Image (cartoon, rainbow, N blue to C red):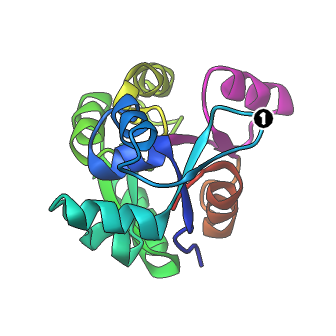
Amino acid sequence: MIKRKDVLTTGQVAQICHVAPRTVTKWFDSGQLKGYRIPGSRDRRIPASELIRFMKAHNMPTDELEKGHIRVLIIDSRVEVARRLAQDLQTKGSFSVEIAQNSFDAGLAAQKMRPNIILVDLMSPDIDAHALCAYVREKEELQACCVIALAAELSATEVDALLKQGFSGVVTEPCNIHRILACIQEKCSVF
């Protein structure tokens, strides 16, 4: 079972509040949003309880954060496979899931829902997974998003190539929900 983290990065806070990461940095640096810096780094961390306090003080909705929902976008042209995966995720953790069946719909859904995690089937004919990954990495508001490639029977060289292209993780047993959850837990900084 995946649970909400108690400490968030500025990128995660930006996703939750639907603002740019630099806006969160300004809130932090001005003292409006309390947290701490990682020693020896410029990275900031914000306790979830502090974020909830800040959001309530500024009349921002906190329902999703307090419930601990992790937003997942599944991109797969095979509707039944995608629905089964969505159902498995909702059963195993606090996930809010949407499905896109092609690259165009995936781009629209990513902008609208600002997912924490994107699971993309590399074998789907209507999806350019590499272009999608590049798109997510280019968009400032999506940069904290974890993009996981799903494809069976990949070699270690192919997995390394995908990681170098910007994918956060690769699951080579896409029908195994436990492998997918393990990859999410290991690779993604979800709250």
Question: Residue at left 42%, top 28%?
Answer: 136
Q: Is residue 155 magenta?
A: yes
Q: Assess disc 1: are there few (<14), some (14-19) or many (≥20) residues with their C-alpha within 10 Å of its C-alpha.
A: few
Q: Could you tell me if residue 118 is visible in this image?
A: no
In-front residue for pair 39/72: 39
Q: Position of residue 127 (x, y in %)?
A: 39, 30
Q: Amino acid at mark 1?
A: Gly
State the extent of the magenta-drawn residues as a range.
146-171
Q: Position of residue 67 (x, y in %)?
A: 36, 77
Q: Residue at x 25, y 28 (%)?
A: 104
Residue 181 percent coordinates (x, y): 62, 64
33 in magenta? no
Residue that mark 1 sits on: 40
Q: Is residue 28 visible?
A: yes
Left or right of residue 126: residue 129: right
Residue 173 image-quadrant placement: bottom right
